[in-house]
Image (cartoon, grey):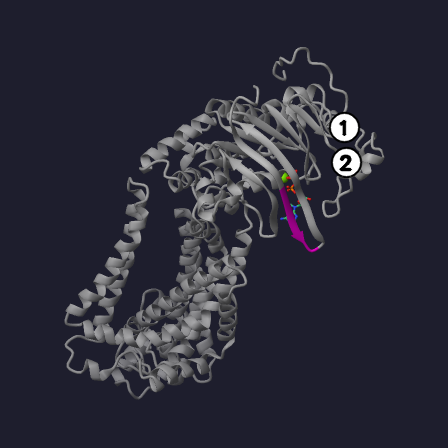
Amino acid sequence: MTTSTHTPVLQVIDLSLRYQTRQGEVQAVEGVSFELQQGQSLGLVGESGCGKTSVATSLMRLLPENARLTRGQVRLNGTDLLELDDEEMRSYRWRRIAMVFQAAMNSLDPVHRVGQQIIEAIEAHGMETTVSDARERVARLFRMVGLDPQLMDRYPHEFSGGMRQRAVIAMALSCDPDLIIADEPTTALDVIVQDRILRELKLVQQELRMGMIYISHDIGVVAEVTDRIGVMYAGRLVELGDTADVFRSPMHPYTAALMSSFPSVHGERLPLQGLAGEPPNLIDPPSGCPFHPRCQYADEVCRTEFPERSIHEDHWAACWHPLEVTVTGDGSRDGCG
Amino acid sequence: MTGYLAKRAGQMALTLFLIVTLTFFLVQAQPGDYATFYALNPDLPAEVRAQIKESFGLDKPLWQQYLVHMKNTFTGNFGVSFGHFPRPVLDVLAERLPRTAVLFLTATAVSFYVGFFLGKAIAWRRGGVLEYAATISGATLFTAFTPAFGLMMIWIFAFKLGWLPVGKFLDPLVWRGAEVSANHVFSYMLVTGAAFIAFAFLVLFFFRRSGRIGSAPLVRPVIAVAALAIPVAWAFSDIGYLALDILRHMILPIVTLTLISFAGTMLLTRNSMLETMREDYVMAARAKGLPEKVVRDRHAARNALLPVVTSLVYSLIFAIDGSVIIEGVFSWPGMGMTLLDAVRSEDLPLVMGSMVFIGLFSLLAHVIVDVLYVYLDPRIRYQ
Ligand SMILES: Nc1ncnc2c1ncn2[C@@H]1O[C@H](COP(=O)(O)OP(=O)(O)OP(=O)(O)O)[C@@H](O)[C@H]1O
Ligand SMILES: [Mg+2]
């Protein structure tokens, strides 16, 4: 899928987010920009604490009280969400952007029936006018994610982990959003269930032609479901490209290290090869390229100046010494088999 | 659920048995002899005395008296009150118990509602003026010395301002020439109240089932209309002014009790809310684009309610204990006053009867709160 022919569903421009803490200001997101076309999916990957969830919650404007968006725009079909007033933003949530939370298992309220929790969203956005229509919609959604519609009158505690996960995905789809954000939606599940749900999620996303942002720390998982991959490090987007390209030849040393540490979704996890040390403290991030303390190629310029983008067609990395791009023939790409 | 209720009923019976036993021996342990009170009471005609002596087994040894007492209690024979002679104890209690129950259940409900409402509001908007005002005044009132505070309320609202009656259940001047008894009017009031509550539940139930999304907003107006219609209907009836007199007498004790006790619920709700507001399902509710009020009430507060409801048991028991003091201060002729008078005048059958019914009342309160909790928390409901 080429990116330039469609108008983007989502344009994130220079997004920056700070958290005020007692220890100081956490620079959780720094100058992140990317685009997403209709029906396209983007994977956001990176180690724990690199700011993936912060990007997601900024898009939904669901930030904790100590968070401050210092710069940037989030354009959804051209409208900058950060400019909307609270009531307008409320009508955008779920109707335009829906989210499957990282703690998806706990995003169902224990005291209400699962179906009812979906119906209340349908109701809040006026998607249906009668209760029976709304129930019919829930039944459709349940079938779509592989749940028996009869389960809609059950309570969350009567669901298994996998069922809850599916219910939460059904909930996110309930108002036909233009964009769905899935923040590590399957981490709490065992690998088999995880894999199945992931594939189903991808099918649904393609069928409904929604944009999707899929967040994971596991680049192998992301590669299975997304068209494009963005790699985050210390609050910054450091590499972005089509999944096939990034996988065939990562440009950023950090991406390469991530890939070597996750041989496949099903394989055992090796320690991060060639990636000694901890991710940096975001209160006082390293100067220059934030990855330089852990990078085997780092030199003087890496320590002092943030890298310019090295661009190769639709694929770029913020690195002074990008890895060599292996030739991909005439530019026609097959999927990432 | 039925099994659960059966189990609770069994526990209740056992506890009641213990209460009866304990009261019996406590009264026995008092100086003076239970038997002689009956046998030597000069108010009693000789033949009645003999009859009582026999039916209560007062000529028998203590353990046999105990057995007879137990049998009498569980067959509903509490004997005859000395102080209200010749009314049976049961008759006195049947008059007094509803008065206490209505006063204290209303006060507990109002106080719970106020506390819960304020608690969720101050948790939702932290650091506001409301938070400081509610916390400081609530805590002050909570620690106030109850009788002194009650007297102060009477002084302000009854003496100085003259808005409300000083105390008691009714004003004899109003009732002069009335053709119905106070008990009669009061029981009509009880029936009306119960009918209204039942109606409100039916309305809630009906609208929840009905077809159109967005019909829920009708619930409040419909209930409000009913709530307005009831006073109007009473006003046109010929006992309306009598009911109003009783109501006027209830206001001051209820307000006083509410002021004294709302802070407990409020602070508990606040803490519980601060917990639930951090839960992922509250974030999810907000993400769904639900109005803030819905997020607060249907999700954060609804879950925060669970631990607070547990504390309702203590509020009710606190209310029952407090009834002795509060009823004394407001001269409210309920169970608390009855018990106090009975103890003072050594009206032993009435003392024992009151104790049994106060015990029964707190047991019932306990069970009702437990059942309510089970109803509110589906995780327990289906176990
Ligand atoms: N409410 C907050 N207050 C202060 N700091 C925060 C807060 N939320 C996140 N952070 C910090 O911001 C940085 C980015 O956090 P974020 O949750 O976005 O990372 P993440 O990539 O989603 O991590 P994970 O993979 O563990 O979910 C981290 O350093 C984190 O400690
Ligand atoms: Mg995260």
Pointers 1 and 2 in contact (C-beta within 8 Å): yes
Q: Does the magenta portion include A9?
A: no
In the picture, measured across the screen, residue A226 lies left or right of residue B253, that is: right
In the picture, measured across the screen, residue A72 lies left or right of residue B150, that is: right
Residue annotated with mark 1: A253
Depth check: B279 or A2 in front?
A2
SS category of the residue bearing label 2? loop
Q: Is residue B262 visible?
A: yes
The first of marks 1 and 2 along the sequence is 1
x and y, in percent, of residue A28 in the image: 66, 43
Does B113 appear above or below A326? below
The part of the image, by quadrant, that contains residue A335 is: top right
Q: Magenta segment, which residues?
A: A16-22
**Label 1 Cα neighbours within 10 Å, binned few <14 / some 14-19 / many ≥20:** many
Name which residue lies at 44% across and 47% down.
A87
Residue A122 disc label: none
Q: Is mark 1 within 8 Å of ligand 1?
A: no
Does B314 appear above or below A266? below
Q: The residue marked by circle 1 belongs to what chain?
A: A
Depth check: B91 or A87 in front?
A87
